[in-house]
Image (tube, helix red, strand yellow):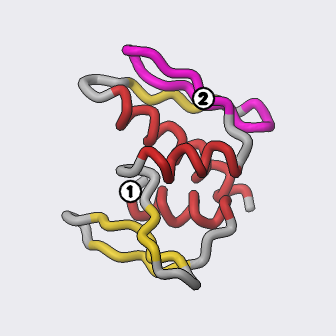
Amino acid sequence: MTDKELLELAAKAAGISGLYRGDTVHIQGFYVYPNNTLWNPLTDNGDALWLAVKLELNVCCDADGAAVIDKEGGPTWESAKTDPYAATRRAIVRAAAAIGEKM
């Protein structure tokens, strides 16, 4: 799944309306209406935390990676490789996208 698809499904799960901005090289995120702010939990720690709280996700992370469990118990794991913060954000977005797919 592309980053664009992940963001679209995560936005759907969180009830976010907006316009996706970016291309295959430069993913910017969503301009959220009505205040036209940029929302991208793949790159922004605050947006990722907001998404995790909004969807009541349980997040557990360490130097190896991040695990996210949704309310239905579905686990999502992302390996940290070199950046545990990016892994945690991506795990949160992937878990949110899985919720959005079910909607």
| Residue 89, position as x, y percentages in the image | 45, 40
Q: Residues within 10 Å of mark 2 (few under 14, many from 20)?
A: some
Q: Give the quadrant of the C terminus.
A: bottom right
Looking at this view, name the residue that lies furthest to the bottom: 34
What x and y, as percent, mark residue 78?
A: 44, 29
Is 70 part of what is drawn in magenta?
A: yes
Write the residue at 48% across / 48% down: 46
To which residue does mark 1 refer? Answer: 3
Residue assigned mark 2: 59
Taking the spot 50% from the left edge, 21% from the top edge, the residue there is: 61
Report the amino acid beneath label 1. Asp
**Nearer-the-camera pick, 102 or 70:** 70
Residue 23, percent from left and from top: 26, 72
User: Start and end of the magenta stretch?
Assistant: 58-73
> Left or right: 58 with respect to 6?
right
Q: Nearer the viewer, mark 1 or mark 2?
A: 2
Q: Residue furthest top?
A: 63
Circle 1 sits in a helix, a strand or a loop, which is it?
helix
Total marks placed: 2
**Residue 29, above or below 2:** below
The disc, 1 or 2, on the residue closer to the chain's N-terminal end is: 1
Q: Amino acid at mark 2?
A: Val
**Residue pictured at 60% horizontal, 77% vertical:** 17
In the image, residue 2 lies in the stretch drawn in magenta: no
Classify 20 as above or below 89: below
Q: Say what secondary structure mark 2 lies in.
A: strand
Given residues 102 and 50, the one toward you in this image is 50
